[in-house]
Amino acid sequence: MTLHYWALTDTGTVRKHNEDNLLSRPDLGLWVVADGAGGHDSGELASGMIVEALDRLPPNLSASELISHIRLAIGGVHAALRAEAARRGGNAVIASTLVCLMIRGQHFACLWAGDSRAYVLRHGQLQQITRDHSLVQELVDGGTLSAEEAESHPHANVITRAVGADDDDLELDKVIGQVLPRDRFLLCSDGLSKTLSETEIANLLGAPEGMPPTELLIGAAIARNVNDNVTAIVVQI
């Protein structure tokens, strides 16, 4: 299969610094979005350490080796961020969400922690691959909140899992599936998914070839005065 990809990040219309980071490793069939949290350069440090660790992965790894190496690398970053937060003391937060897409042959795998998302546009239909690790998602799963109410909930930005967060051990969730011709995968930070509706994302992601889809998506978020950093990677089969 032939793969095309586009990657773009923007500070947005409100924030002064970009705490998002991204990585494209087509040699490994790996794409990554990380959305840092903590402020005062801490978010940028956390997402940057994730990207640096994964950028050091050796080439020529098999699919199973790649997943194992990612888990080990992110586990090391998680421990290092927790140690740095403890050194700073107080209520220091140095953490980041993470979503990874791996494509090998006719299959894909996603690993993630937090509320950065992966989608696939297939036959004109947008499917969310990942499931947010967030307070509102737990409320939706428990039946006390609808998906529509979750979008505007005052605690919609509260995540329950992240690289560098309080838990001693970090578990990255995984989803695997088949790749089909003309699939378009999207990785994005929550600056995009909380600003544009799924219908808008599907329309922009499926727009006829011309302007890169990442520019369309991020341009639309900026036009909507996105109040967060915004990052998108699109991988097309």
Image (cartoon, grey):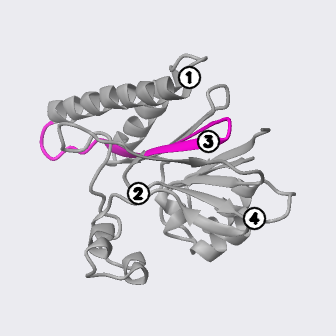
Q: Residue at x 58, y 72 (%)?
A: 198
The mark that comes first in sequence, 3 or 2, is 3
Q: Is residue 197 left or right of residue 78?
A: right
Please tell me in which quadrant of the rendered image residue 123 appears. bottom right
Kindly identify the amino acid type of the residue bearing the numbered disc 4. Gly
Q: Which residue corresponds to mark 4?
A: 206
Real-space Cα separation, disc 4 to disc 2, in angstroms: 23 Å
In the rendered image, is residue 99 in sight?
Answer: no
- What's the residue type where badge 3 is placed? His
Q: Position of residue 233 (x, y in %)?
A: 63, 48
Judge whether residue 101 is colored magenta: yes
Cβ atoms at labels 4 and 3 below 8 Å apart: no
Q: Position of residue 145 (x, y in %)?
A: 31, 81
Foreground disc of the pair 4, 1: 1
Left or right placement of residue 204 versus residue 69 in this view: right
Q: Point out the image quarter for the N terminus.
A: top right
| Residue type indicated by callout 1 | Ser
- Foreground tag (3 vs 2): 3
Assess whether mark 1 and mark 4 are in contact (beta carbons under 8 angstroms): no
Q: Is residue 109 above or below residue 145?
A: above
The residue wearing badge 1 is 62
Q: Name the residue carrying label 2.
A: 115
| Tag 2 secondary structure | loop
Amino acid tagged 2: Asp
Highlighted magenta segment, given as a residue range: 89-111
Give the residue at mark 3: 107
User: Is 57 located above or below residue 45 in the figure?
Assistant: above
Q: Residues within 10 Å of mark 1 (few under 14, many from 20)?
A: few
